[in-house]
Image (tube, rainbow, N blue to C red):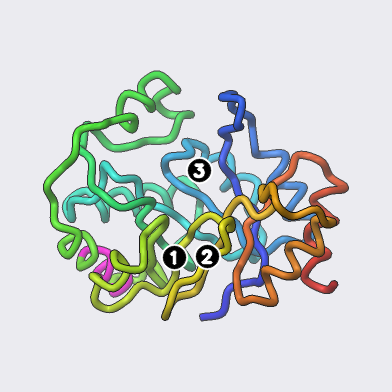
C-alpha cells in the first residue's frame, strides 16, 4: 500500500485547551486536494469528519484508544469508528499510544453521548494488564477481517516496535525532534512546530517528504491549507 505523501489532521483539541468544530475545516482541506486524513476515536468527532469526507476518495488513518486494547473491545471499537465515518475499511489503523488503560465503556462519538460522558469514558488513568502481544494479534485479525488494509502504532519507541511480530506498517510520531525508526513508514504530526527552524511552511514540509516522512498538517486558514499542500509539488 502507498499512502499519499502529505495528510491532514482532524483533532479538535487546541493548545490553549479549547475544542473546535473541524467539519468545515476538513471539507476545505478535501476540496483543496488533500487525500489523506488522520482520525481517532479519542477525538470524538468521527461522525463530523465522515460527513466532511463523504463522496471523496480520501485515504483514512484511524486510531483505537487505549481503553479498547483488550481483544474483545478492539474489534467493536474499530467497527464503530468505521460506521461513524461511513467507510468500509481503514487504509491504516493504529494503536493510539503504548499502554492499555482500564475499559469503562465504549468510546462513542460526542454527538451520541456528549463531552462530559465522553471524557468520563476516555480520560482513564488506571492501567490495564492486557499484554501488548494480545492486542497486536487482535489488530492482525482486524486486518484479516478486511477492516484495515494495514495496521500500525503511534508514539511507540523503536524497542516497543521491535517487540511486535510482525513489525507494524507505520509509526505515527511527532516530527520534532526528527524521527528515525527502522523498518516502518513514519507519519509525523505537528510538522510545523519546531522552534529551531525558520523557513516557509511548504519548504519544511517538502524537506520532511524528501526524507520519507508523511507529515500531517492542520490549519484553520484556507490559504495556509492550500500552501501546505503545495509542498507536494514544491
Q: Which mark is residue 46?
A: 3
> In x, y percent, where is residue 227?
85, 56
The verdict on residue 141 being magenta is: yes
The residue lying at 80 percent from left, 53 percent from top is 198
Asked if the residue at tag 2 contacts the one at tag 1, i.e. Cβ–Cβ closer than 8 Å, the answer is: yes
Q: CA distance from mark 2 to mark 3?
A: 28 Å
Number of other residues with Cα within 10 Å of mark 1, as a class: few under 14, some 14 to 19, many 20 or more? many
* Foreground label between 1 and 3: 1
Quarter holding the C terminus?
bottom right
> In x, y percent, where is residue 94?
39, 59
* Foreground label between 1 and 2: 2
The residue lying at 11 percent from left, 47 percent from top is 129
Q: Is residue 232 visible?
A: yes
Corner quadrant of residue 33: bottom right
The residue lying at 32 percent from left, 71 percent from top is 143
Q: CA distance from mark 1 to mark 3?
A: 21 Å
Number of other residues with Cα within 10 Å of mark 2, as a class: few under 14, some 14 to 19, many 20 or more? some
Q: Main secondary structure of the magenta part?
A: helix
Question: Which residue is labeled 1 in the image?
Answer: 171
Q: Is residue 147 visible?
A: no
- Circle 1 SS class: strand
Number of other residues with Cα within 10 Å of mark 3, as a class: few under 14, some 14 to 19, many 20 or more? many
Asked if the residue at tag 3 contacts the one at tag 1, i.e. Cβ–Cβ closer than 8 Å, the answer is: no
The residue lying at 80 percent from left, 66 percent from top is 231
Corner quadrant of residue 18: top right
Along the polypeptide, which appears first: circle 2 or circle 3?
3
Q: Which residues are magenta?
A: 138-144
Direction from residue 183 to residue 225 in the image, left or right: right
- Circle 3 SS class: helix
Question: Which residue is labeled 2 in the image?
Answer: 179
Along the polypeptide, which appears first: circle 1 or circle 3?
3
In front here: 118 or 204?
204
Amino acid at each position: 500500500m502507498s499512502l499519499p505523501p502529505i495528510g491532514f489532521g482532524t483533532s479538535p483539541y487546541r493548545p490553549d485547551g479549547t475544542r473546535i468544530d473541524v467539519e468545515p475545516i476538513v471539507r476545505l482541506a478535501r476540496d483543496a486536494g488533500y487525500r489523506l486524513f488522520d482520525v481517532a476515536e479519542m477525538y470524538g468527532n468521527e461522525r463530523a469528519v465522515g460527513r466532511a469526507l463523504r463522496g471523496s476518495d480520501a485515504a483514512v488513518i484511524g486510531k483505537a484508544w487505549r481503553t479498547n486494547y483488550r481483544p474483545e473491545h478492539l474489534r467493536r471499537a474499530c467497527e464503530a469508528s468505521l460506521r461513524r465515518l461511513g467507510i468500509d475499511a481503514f487504509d491504516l489503523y493504529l494503536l493510539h499510544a503504548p499502554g492499555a488503560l482500564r475499559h469503562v465503556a465504549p468510546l462513542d462519538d460526542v454527538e451520541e453521548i456528549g463531552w462530559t460522558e465522553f471524557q468520563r469514558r476516555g480520560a482513564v488513568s488506571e492501567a490495564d494488564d492486557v499484554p501488548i502481544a494480545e492486542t497486536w494479534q487482535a489488530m492482525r485479525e482486524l486486518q484479516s477481517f478486511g477492516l484495515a488494509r494495514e495496521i500500525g502504532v503511534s508514539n511507540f519507541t523503536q524497542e516497543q516496535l521491535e517487540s511486535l511480530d510482525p513489525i507494524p506498517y507505520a509509526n505515527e510520531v511527532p516530527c520534532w525532534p526528527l524521527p528515525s525508526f527502522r523498518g516502518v513508514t513514519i507519519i509525523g504530526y505537528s510538522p510545523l512546530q519546531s522552534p529551531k527552524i525558520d523557513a516557509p511552511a511548504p519548504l519544511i514540509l517538502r524537506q520532511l517528504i524528501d526524507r520519507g516522512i508523511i507529515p500531517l498538517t492542520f490549519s484553520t486558514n484556507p490559504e495556509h491549507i492550500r500552501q501546505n499542500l503545495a509542498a507536494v509539488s514544491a
